[in-house]
Image: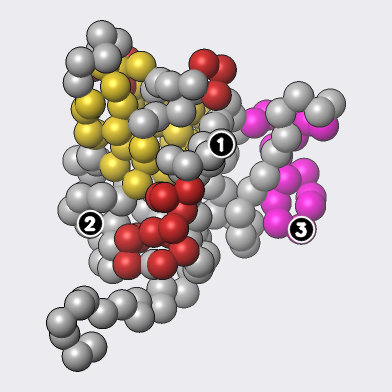
Amino acid sequence: MDPRYAGFECWVAGAGIRGMFNSKGNTIADRTPACNMGIYWDGDVLSEILNGTTIDKWDYRDAKSIRILNTADYQCRSNNGTKSNPVLSADILGDWREEVIYRTADDKELRIFSTAIPTEHKFYTLMHDPQYRLSIAWQNVGYNQPPHLSFFMGAGMNQPPKPFISFPGTAK
Ligand SMILES: [Ca+2]
Ligand SMILES: [Ca+2]
């Protein structure tokens, strides 16, 4: 979320530990976002924040979240009480950015949200990564947690490895 530091950022909720940390363990911000899961939503390779029914962009200069989308504006609700998950977040359509699925408040529909923001980055879909694909399954079989790639995606990333995937009935 913060391109000034290599690797991921982390923080803790409810343990009396304040601030955001970089991958070296150094404090890089006093404030932290309300965050349940990450999501690759806009055009850059930084992760956005998926929390409840909302997707936010972390403004690392001012250490605050900026709202991109609130699916509650489209009659959607999160699941699982205080855990507040979507039905699913996953790269299931289109390019490598992730989509997110919610139920409607009346439980009669599933609604799929997909980014409309252009990107300059051209990657294989995230579902081409076997670890990510497995992550999508584990979201739905236990205590919901966000999917993770087997390679680093973020500022300063290398080109992702070419997927080692073949289709049934084809040689390669
Ligand atoms: Ca992004
Ligand atoms: Ca996608």
Amino acid type shown at disc 1: Tyr
Q: Is residue 168 left or right of residue 37?
A: left
Q: Residue furthest bottom?
A: 171
Magenta region:
17-32
Q: Quick one: 70 or 149, which is closer to the camera? A: 149
Q: Secondary structure at mark 1?
A: loop
The residue located at (46%, 64%) in the rendering is 131
Please identify the quadrant where the C terminus is shown: bottom left
* Left or right of 160 in this view: 21: right
Point out the frontmost of discs 1 and 3: 1
Residue at 36% across / 37% down in the picture? Answer: 88
Question: At numbered mark 2, what does the secondary structure look like: helix, strand or loop?
Answer: loop
Residue, disc 3: 24
Label 2 packing within 10 angstroms: few (<14), some (14-19), many (20+): some
Instruction: Find residue 109 and report its image quarter.
Output: top left
Which residue is pictured at 53% across the width and 47% down the height? Answer: 1
Residues marked 1 and 2 touching at CB (< 8 Å)? no
Say which label, 1 or 2, has the lower sequence index: 2
Any mark on residue 95, and which? Answer: 2
Q: Give the amino acid at mark 3.
A: Lys
CA distance for labels 1 and 3:
28 Å
Q: Main secondary structure of the magenta part?
A: loop
Q: Position of residue 82 (x, y in %)?
A: 56, 17
Question: Crowdedness of circle 1 by 10 Å Cα count: few (<14), some, many (20+)?
Answer: few
Q: Is residue 113 visible?
A: yes
Asked whether 80 falls inside the magenta stretch, the response is no
The image's mark for residue 143 is: 1
Label 2 C-beta lies within 8 Å of the nearest ligand 2 atom = yes
State how the image is colored: secondary structure
